[in-house]
C-alpha cells in the first residue's frame, strides 16, 4: 500500500457516499411525484392505502438519507493524513483478512479489484483494532486478525 492508494480509497469512499445520497434523493423525488399523482386519483380505500404506503416509504428514505448525510459529515471531519504506527480513526489497516479503513460504518466497497471495509470504531472489529500496532493480533467472533501494515 502507498499513501496515494489510501488517498484513492478515501476519494472513492466519498464518491460512493455521494452516489448513494443522490440515489436516495432521486427515489424520494419519485415517491413525492407518486404521492402527488395518487392524490389526483379517485378516492377510495385502495388509493388511501397506496398513498399511506408511499408516505411510509418516503419517511424511511428520509431517515436513510439523513443517516447517510450525517455519516458523510463525520467522514469529512476525520484526519486521514498522519500515521503514527498505531491504529486510530483515519487509519488504513492491512491485515491477513483484508483491508480496513477505520472511519464510518459504510461497509464494503470494491476499488481497483480490491475490497476495502469501511468500519467505525463502534463496531466490534473497529473497536478491537483501535490502539493496536503492526504485528498485533486480535480475535473477533472467533476470527483471528493479524495487523500487517498501518497507513
Image: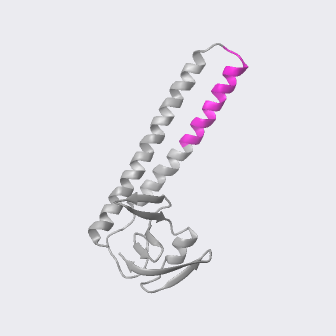
Image point 43% across, 77% down: which residue?
87
Image point 61% across, 15% down: which residue?
41
> Where, by quadrant of the figure, is residue 134 drawn?
bottom left
Indicate the quadrant containing the C terminus: top left, top right, bottom left or bottom right: bottom left
Magenta stretch in the rendered image: 43-62
Toward the bottom, the furthest residue is 135
16 left or right, relative to 105: left
**Count of numbered circles on the image:** 0
Image point 44% across, 86% down: which residue?
135
Q: Is residue 49 magenta?
A: yes
Question: Residue 32 appears at what percent x and percent y?
Answer: 52, 28
35 versus 16 height, above or below: above
Question: Residue 1 appears at what percent x and percent y?
Answer: 32, 73
Name the magenta segment's main secondary structure.
helix
Question: Residue 21 appears at what percent x and percent y?
Answer: 44, 45
Q: Is residue 108 magenta?
A: no
Of 147 and 114, nearer the camera is 114
Toward the front, the furthest residue is 113
Question: Residue 108 appears at what percent x and percent y?
Answer: 47, 60
> Where, by quadrant of the figure, is residue 6 drawn?
bottom left
> Where, by quadrant of the figure, is residue 9 drawn?
bottom left
30 versus 144 height, above or below: above
Image point 73% across, 20% down: which residue?
45
Toward the left, the furthest residue is 4
73 left or right, relative to 64: left
Amino acid at each position: 500500500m502507498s499513501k496515494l492508494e489510501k488517498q484513492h480509497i478515501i476519494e472513492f469512499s466519498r464518491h460512493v457516499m455521494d452516489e448513494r445520497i443522490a440515489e436516495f434523493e432521486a427515489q424520494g423525488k419519485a415517491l413525492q411525484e407518486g404521492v402527488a399523482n395518487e392524490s389526483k386519483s379517485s378516492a377510495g380505500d385502495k388509493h388511501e392505502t397506496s398513498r399511506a404506503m408511499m408516505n411510509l416509504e418516503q419517511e424511511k428514505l428520509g431517515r436513510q438519507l439523513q443517516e447517510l448525510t450525517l455519516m458523510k459529515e463525520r467522514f469529512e471531519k476525520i484526519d486521514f493524513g498522519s500515521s503514527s504506527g498505531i491504529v486510530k480513526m483515519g487509519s488504513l489497516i492491512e491485515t491477513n483478512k483484508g483491508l480496513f479503513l477505520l472511519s464510518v460504518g459504510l461497509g464494503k466497497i470494491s476499488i481497483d479489484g480490491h475490497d476495502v471495509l469501511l468500519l467505525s470504531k463502534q463496531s466490534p472489529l473497529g473497536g478491537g483494532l483501535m490502539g493496536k500496532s503492526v504485528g498485533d493480533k486480535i480475535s473477533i467472533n472467533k476470527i483471528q486478525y493479524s495487523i500487517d501494515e498501518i497507513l
